[in-house]
Each structure stands twice: as structure tokens, then as C-alpha cells.
Amino acid sequence: MTDTRRVTHLPPSGVADARGRPRAVVVGAGIAGLAAATGLAERGFAVDVVEREQHLGGRVAGWSDTLSDGSTVAMNRGFHAFFRQYYNLRALLRRIDPDLAMLTPVEDYPLIDARGRRDTFRGLPTAPPLNALMFALRSPTFRLRDLARINARAAAPLAAVSVPEVYERLDDRTAEDFLRDINFPDAARHLAFEVFSRSFFAKPPDLSAAELATMFHIYFLGSSEGLVFDVADANFDDALWNPLRRYLETLGARVHTGTSVTSVAPSWTVTLDTGDTLAADAVVLATDVTGCRRIVVDSPALGDPAWRQSIDDLGTAPPFVVHRLWLDRPVRADRPPFLGTGGRPPLDNVSVLERYERQAAQWSRRTGGSVVELHAYAATADEADLRDRLLARLYELYPETAAATIVDERVLCRQDCPRFAPGDFAGRPGVTTPYPGLMLAGDGIRIDLPVALMERAATTGWAAANAILAHHGVRGHLLHTVPTEGRSALLRRLAGQRRSLSA
């Protein structure tokens, strides 16, 4: 929290602790559910957390696996970046370590395109808009004449983002159309801007221009926290979620894993797949899109028709594939721990896990090998040649791996990330529902603040807890975000003039 212009969002006032120890059920133990459970348990609620998987963390979960040689290794669903402007996620993690010692910095993540041109985020100034300008000027895909050709008036929304107004202005357009309209150079767009769309497991033709603009605001022009990030220094279960579970249990919370919720009835009764029920004064649905839709369909008394339709209209992004390899020899020492790619389908990025993850480093030291992870977005594991194509791309970028023997490998294919397509925002359900005792949380849930990805999940979780606490007259928790509008008054005026001309 080094940005002096970050915004603090105050919750409604109230008493310090809930009277009579009301009960809450939180459905889903991903980031959103764990934030909601923490927010409620810390204010005196008796909390039950129900998670269908055997482990916590949702899409940032970690677990143990056994290789064919009998060795135990760490496994998860792939690399996650903990950016410095993820204030509300970091507030959650500070419950288990105020110093966040479980996070270690990655000072750079280079991007490389099909022609070998490389962009880097290392050493950029943190002050907007100098950070974006310097990135563009030193990029091999962006030339000075390209800067002169940018349609400044059309591009003004990038520098004058405010939420939710940016969605009202741009959500009906694709990210690809928006970048074309502002004359952003093709090569730079392919390498630099696609990193934002790939964060949503989408290609620019399938991503809302408003989401692209909001991401640009969060990471570049709206924040001075910088674009470098931290990563967990151990597998997610070990570094994050098992300690947080223990913290919740010290507050009296009960965590039920390997258990699904089948339905929710107003007033509130939560039915489990075991046939058992949990009575509650409040419920937070913090599942993925498919889980939320299923629960609502099987809970016919829940919500009004318009709200139920908004749940049914939620969509999922294309599937993504994580291919993890255990190699019998090391990746070259000068390789970055994370490398993003452009124009090298189906590969989107490469991670060398022993550079930052404790369990992978232990395996590497013991065997002399490397643990490498390949990501492919908008792909499916049953593509006949996907494995071979991913490996071919790895060998192009890290030629030394071509001679390595693959000791073992794991391929995960999932399709459970929310969709952020053009036009989705207006109908997206928010944290509050037709019932004051029922809240939604998750990275696919609408909240009118400049947050995205893991930070949106954490923020909606805290917001869900705050709404329930307010209903009970209990003080909520502070939220923090990057500035809620563009930092430059000049650019905001330019954007305003453009809006007036187009009206």
C-alpha cells in the first residue's frame, strides 16, 4: 500500500460484535468465500464454510499428488500473480501473517512474440502515466511514429476510467474493436495488451472493452503500485489456505470439505448432499458460475424472476489447460521464472516453478531436474496434438529442455472461470440480492469498484460480509482500491469532451 492516492471505502458503522452469535453459511471456500467467512467470524458470527472439494482455495487451490516413481509432489491449477494493488486480498492474507512473508517478489515477467521481440516490465517507473509511456517507448513493438498515430480522443477512456461509468460507455464493444479504433499498433497490441485479455482466459474479440480499460487502469494509469508482482513461496495449500483455515477455526468457524450444497431455502435452510441441513441467519453463495446456477435452479423459492434470470445468464470463459512437467535436468539458470508469449499458439505462458515454489525447489534439488508449467488458454485437453504443440513451443523458447526426459506430467483442463464478454455487465448480478440475508461473492459477481480477478473475488467476499453485518447493526471492514477515476484531470476532461461530442 505505497500509493498515497489509493481509496479507502468505509463500511457502515455499528457495534463491534454481533449480539446473540447469529449463524452464517458460506457456500464455497475460494478466495471470495474465505474472505466472507473471515469478515463474519471476526465480528462474532458462527460460520459454517461448505466446500465441495477436499481442499480450500477454489481456483487457487493446492494439493498433493504422487508421481509414477512414488514421490509426493505439490500440484495446483497454475501460476497466480499477487499484485501489490490487491489490497483486499492482501488484507485477508495478513490474517495469517501481517508481514506477508509467504509472498516473494517476481521482479519481471517478460513477454516474447513469434518474431522473438521481447517486452519487459523490469525497472519501469511507478508513477502514472510515465510508467505506461516508458513501457511503450522502450518496447520493440512500439515506435515513436506509432505513438503519434494513436487516436488520443478515442483512447481517452483508457486514462479516464471510472467505475461503473466505463462499463456504460464501453461494455458493448470488444477489446479488439476498441484497440483498432484507437490505432494501437498491431504488433504491440498482440504482445502487450493480450496479457490483459488472457488474464480472463479470453481473446480480445471475446473480451469486453470495458474490462480491458479497467485492467489498464488498475495496473498502469490508475495505480502507482507498479506492474511487478509477488508469488506464493510454497504450494497454495501450504502457504495460504491451511493456515487461514486454522485461523478461521480459532474463531469458531466450521469448515466442511468434500461436501456440496444442493439447495438453499429462504429463512435460511441450506441442504447438503449428505441429506443434512444447516440452519442460518444469513447465506453467502461464493461458488463458481456453474455451482451458483445449479444451486439457484434447485432452489425454486429463491429470488424473483429477474434475479434468477441474471444468474442463469452468467457464462463461463473458454477452457484452459495447465500442463505441468517434471524434467530430469534443469532449465538454464538465466531463464525467467515466468514468461508470457504472444503469437505462439497454443502456448500462452511458461513457469519454472523451482525458482519460487518451495516444494518444486526441493524436488529439483533432490533430482537435479526442473518443474515446468505450460498454460494454454481457450484450448481443450482432448485436442489430439495439444501436448505435442505445447512441447514444441517450450523447445523453441527453452531449447535445453528438448534433450530432457519427462519424468512425469500432469494435464488439467478446466472451464469454470467467469465470462466477461461484451454486453455482460448490465445484467451481471451484484453482491446484494432480493433478500437481505443472502449475498453473492466471487470474481464473476458485479461490484462497482476498480477491481479484477483475485482481487475482485476478495473484494466481493468482504463486501458480502459487510452487507450482512450492516443488516445486523455490526460494524463492517474497510475496503481499499486503486483510485476510482483516472489520475489525470486533463485526460478526464478530454474523455468528457469526447463523450459530449458523441452524445
Image: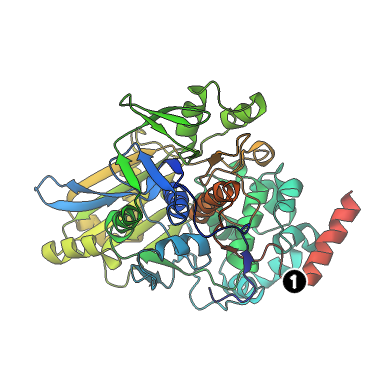
Which is nearer the eye, 180 or 310? 310
> Residue at the front extreme?
20
Q: Quadrant of residue 241?
A: bottom left
> Residue 130: x and y, percent?
65, 76
Q: Is residue 10 left or right of residue 455?
A: right
Which is nearer the eye, 165 or 208? 165
Which is nearer the eye, 502 or 445? 445
- Residue located at (62% from left, 59% from top): 13
Marks counted in the figure total 1
Within 10 angstroms of label 1, few (less than 14), some, or many (20 or more) residues?
some
Q: Amino acid at mark 1?
A: Ser
Q: Is residue 322 left or right of residue 470?
A: left
Q: Is residue 3 left or right of residue 257?
A: right
- Residue located at (52% from left, 68% from top): 227
> Residue 483: x and y, percent?
66, 66
- Report which residue position mark 1 lands on: 488
- Residue located at (53% from left, 28% from top): 266
